Image (cartoon, grey):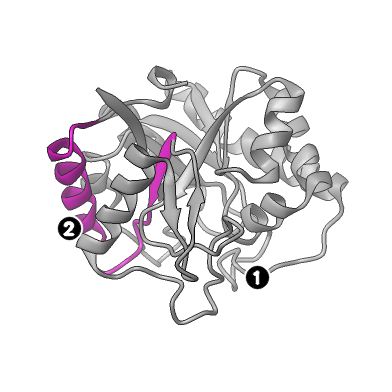
Amino acid sequence: MTKVDLNCDMGESFGAYKLGRDEEILDFITSANIACGFHAGDPATIRKTVQLAMEKNVGIGVHPGLQDLVGFGRRSMQISPQEAYDLVVYQIGAIYAFAKSEGGKIQHVKPHGALYNMAAKSAPLSEAIAEAIYKVDPELILFGLAGGELVKAGKKIGLRTANEVFADRTYQQDGSLTPRTDSQALITNHEAAVNQVIQMVKEGKVTSLQGINVPIQADTICIHGDGANALDFARYISDSLKDAGIEIAKIKEIL
């Protein structure tokens, strides 16, 4: 049976602001990407999210972003490879400490938002991020955009890498995600999103907005937990994948 990991960004509440339905969505995923305090999240939220992930046997992931709370880490910033290295090491440390204190361990690292998209196209940034992860723990798995520079850099340095695809995002003909500033960036219809995922997992391709089929490898699927219908979609995609003969499994069982 075909297997795929299902991941979701988590722990994005901050102070008095609550975002997402993490506890419920954790029932349908296998990997949790936990915000580290730079683009979202705070110490109490990190601790609670780590505890929930452990209770539900979901892989604990580090979700490092740019230091941009106001922009939710989705605005590009000009940073050097050294700065990328430092901010990733720093943020891994935050999640590592909470996981360690709760008797758990971290499984993977997935950069967030603009940092993720910048690294997907920049070899120097990707190599700095991969080096940061490798030097902290070479056993960690690096999640990156399928076919992007981050995956290449991870493989080059000796990390296990997971090619990530997106359920609710459209693609360009070069394999990149359509920028969020584009009105067609998001797929809001649940059935259309699931059909795209099944095509990527079973056929190894995705149809771009330009109508061109782009080769793609799907090791892990990202769903977003901050939408109005996030819980319904998590349940729907989980059920739909199983109905299509696709097993949702931890990334360690796939790589």
Residue 121, compared with residue 153, is above or below; it is below
Circle 2 residue? 232
Inspect the magenta stretch and tell me whether residue 224 lies in it. yes
Inspect the magenta stretch and tell me whether residue 80 lies in it. no
Q: Of residues 93 and 138, which is closer to you in this image?
A: 138
Identify the residue at horizontal 38%, vertical 45% (top origin): 200
Q: Is residue 16 visible?
A: yes
Magenta-highlighted residues: 219-246
| View extreme (front): residue | 212
Going by the image, does 152 lie left or right of 247?
Answer: right
Residue 242's spot in the image, x, y percent?
16, 36
Residue type at mark 1 is Arg
Residue 14's spot in the image, x, y percent?
46, 60
Circle 1 residue? 75
Label 2 crowd (10 A; few <14 / some 14-19 / many >=20)? few
| View extreme (bottom): residue | 183
Residue 167, compared with residue 103, is above or below; it is below
Circle 2: element type: helix
Give yes or no for contact between labels 2 and 1 (Cβ–Cβ under 8 Å).
no
Going by the image, does 201 lie left or right of 34?
Answer: left
Label 1 crowd (10 A; few <14 / some 14-19 / many >=20)? few
**Disc on res. 131:** none
Please give the count of numbered marks on the rendered protein: 2
Identify the residue at horizontal 64%, vertical 42% (top origin): 91
Residue type at mark 2 is Asp
